[in-house]
Image: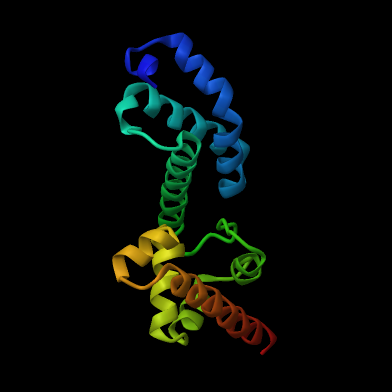
Amino acid sequence: MERLRARDPVAFEHLYDAYHRLVFGIALRMLSDTTMAEDLTQSVFMKIWTSPESFRDGNFGAWLSRVTRNRALDVLRSRASRSEGEIPADIPTESAIDDVVFAKIDSQRVRTALAALPDEQRLLIEMGFFGGITHEAIARRTGIPLGTVKTRIRSGLRRLRGELQSAVSR
C-alpha cells in the first residue's frame, strides 16, 4: 500500500491481480448482473487508486470485501429507489433463510409481515437488510451483544418467513 500511495502503477497492477476476482465475485453475488459487477469492480479499484489512504491498516482483503459490499448495497438501494419503492426480487442474501424470505415477493407483503414482528426483531432486520449495516455495527449502535443481535435477526427471519409463507397460501 505504501507503493500505491506513492502512485506506483506496478503496485496497483499487483494489487488488482491479487484481488479483482474477490471484488468481482462479491459484486456478482450481490447484484446478479455481470455488467453491473464489472462496473462495480472498476469503481472499487478506481477508488483505491484515487484514495489509497482510505485503507489504514489491518486485513486488506476484509477491508476490500467490506468496501465492495457497501458499494453493491448502494447500487441495490439506487435500483430499488428507481423502481417506485419496491424491494427488488433479487436482493442479496447471506443464508438460505434469507433466500426463502426475500425471493420473489412484493414489497407490500414484506412491509405487512415486518410490521407483525416484535420491535426487537423488526428494527434489527431493518437496520441490517434495508440499512446495509453489519451485525457488528448494529451491536455497537444499539448496545445489544453481538450474539443477541444475530439470534434476534435469525429468529425474526424465521418468523418473517412463516408470515410470508402463510400469506402466500391464503
Q: Nearer the viewer, residue 105 or 12?
A: 12
Instruction: Please tell me whether residue 79 is drawn above or below residue 49 in the rendered image.
Output: below
| x 36%, y 59%: residue | 137
Is residue 85 visible in the rendered image? The answer is: no
Left or right: 92 as drawn, with respect to 56: right
| Residue 143 drawn at (x, y percent) | 31, 71
| Residue 91 drawn at (x, y percent) | 55, 58
Instruction: Please tell me whether residue 150 is drawn above or below residue 120 in the rendered image.
Output: above
| x 45%, y 37%: residue | 59
Left or right: 12 as drawn, with respect to 97: left
Q: Quadrant of the N terminus?
A: top left
Instruction: Please tell me whether residue 165 is drawn above or below residue 39 in the rendered image.
Output: below
| Residue 133 drawn at (x, y percent) | 40, 58
Indicate the colouring scheme: rainbow
Q: Nearer the viewer, residue 146 or 79?
A: 146
- The image shows a total of numbered marks equal to 0
Hey, which quadrant is residue 36 in on the image?
Answer: top right
Is residue 113 visible in the rendered image? The answer is: yes
| Residue 13 drawn at (x, y percent) | 51, 15
Taking the view exactly as shown, the residue that stands out farthest to the bottom is: 170
Q: Nearer the viewer, residue 149 or 95?
A: 149
| x 38%, y 75%: residue | 123
